[in-house]
Image (cartoon, rainbow, N blue to C red):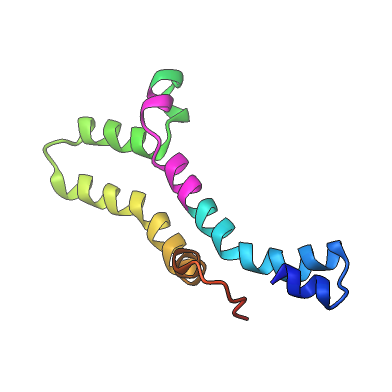
Amino acid sequence: MDEAAKIDSASNFRILWQVIAPLGGPAVATITIFASLQHYNAFMEPLIYISESHMYTLPLGLLWFEGRFGNFWHLVMAASMITILPVILIFFFAQRQFVQGAQFTGLAGR
């Protein structure tokens, strides 16, 4: 597609901006989703580095909550649902970009 744009006398910047960037958008969105979910679910690094309970990430807070309310499973399950809710919302709002990135087509579907 970039060679066809060169034949049509497009500049390098125009090829980058109008041909390559729209094709790379879904792939960049998919990588962004995966990277943010990996950092959101991080457990071991925050467990090693964070020592104060008010700075815990959500997975560490869930572990602390489970240790404190281990016999009250309805509270632990409610906390788990609250913890996973942002991930579900991100998936629903970014589902189109995620599916387009997974398809890896050569067409710039607008």
Residue closer to the observer: 52 or 107: 107
| Residue located at (38% from left, 24% from top) | 47
**Residue 3 lies in what quarter of the image?**
bottom right
Q: Where does the image place residue 7, in percent across and percent down from the top left?
A: 82, 75
Q: Where does the image place residue 23, in percent across and percent down from the top left?
A: 63, 67
Q: Where does the image place residue 56, in percent across and percent down from the top left?
A: 42, 31
Residue 73 can be seen in this image = yes
Q: Where is the C terminus found, in terms of image quarters?
A: bottom right
Residue closer to the observer: 110 or 15: 15
Residue 38 lies within the magenta run: yes
**Residue 38 lies in what quarter of the image?**
top left
| Residue located at (46% from left, 60% from top) | 90
* Left or right: residue 28 compared with residue 75: right
Count how many numbered circles sit on residues in the image: 0
**84 relative to 103, above or below:** above
Q: Which portion, as a residue range, is magenta?
A: 34-47
* Left or right: residue 13 compared with residue 63: right
Residue 44 lies within the magenta run: yes
**27 relative to 41, above or below:** below
Q: Where is the N terminus found, in terms of image quarters?
A: bottom right
User: What secondary structure characterizes most of the magenta part?
Assistant: helix
Q: Where does the image place residue 72, in percent across and percent down from the top left?
A: 14, 42
Residue closer to the observer: 92 or 3: 3
